[in-house]
Image (cartoon, rainbow, N blue to C red):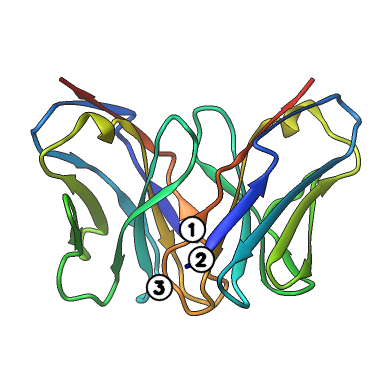
Amino acid sequence: AQKITQTQPGMFVQEKEAVTLDCTYDTSDPSYGLFWYKQPSSGEMIFLIYQGSYDQQNATEGRYSLNFQKARKSANLVISASQLGDSAMYFCAMRPPGGSEKLVFGKGMKLTVNP
Amino acid sequence: SQTIHQWPATLVQPVGSPLSLECTVEGTSNPNLYWYRQAAGRGLQLLFYSVGIGQISSEVPQNLSASRPQDRQFILSSKKLLLSDSGFYLCAWSGALGTEAFFGQGTRLTVV
């Protein structure tokens, strides 16, 4: 079974600094997708970035980049130049292969950006 | 562009009452549809997903059911709500060969 682990319950970062949010996963399948979502206090889940297990390069999307280390089964999210609006819950998720297209989520972690 | 609508945004229901949450997607056809629940301060738990009309897969045994009467409509229901059904319910869709899932605004359900 697939499992996502986010061990950091919460993190604080100063505005304009970079921050890394940890995510490890467990799967025996060679093909899978990894995702990061942001959930502000309003509750909506906002898709941030995607990494395919066969992608040769780490995914980047604006200030977001994914540090994908396949051998270590980690997919850490790096946010550069933090902004106050980045304060939110962040969830790592994985889509296993098999056609169901469902996402398995980690428990999330709370990021607070201080001015 | 694709959009997903979920309503109502908030709901307070007494124990034992029925429930119907509706989710519709616009701008795409044959989407994969999902219902998730998020308990306070917790991650998302997948409740149901559907890959087509009338096709529902349940992830966990519970007091809830789901139906997909139309291609872009997904309904979460209960005949009799329990206190433990309280939570934040999120509907989502993804493309048939898609990658990321896109979420609705969520429904905050409080069973009293």
What's the CA distance linking mark 2 and mark 1? Answer: 9 Å
Residue highlighted by disc 1: B102
Residue highlighted by disc 2: B2
Label 2: few (<14), some (14–19) or many (≥20) C-alpha neighbours in 10 Å: few
Q: Is residue A26 left or right of residue A101?
A: left
Where is residue A109, by image quadrant?
A: top left
Number of residue marks: 3
Mark 3 residue element: loop
Residue type (three-letter) at the residue carrying disc 2: Gln
Q: Are marks 2 and 1 on the same chain?
A: yes
Residue highlighted by disc 3: A29
- Could you tell me which residue is drawn at 25 percent across and 55 percent down? A75
- Could you tell me which residue is drawn at 51 percent across and 66 percent down? B2
The foreground one among A19 and A63 is A63
Labelled pair 2, 3 in contact (Cβ < 8 Å):
no
The chain to which mark 1 is attached is B
The foreground one among B108 and A95 is B108
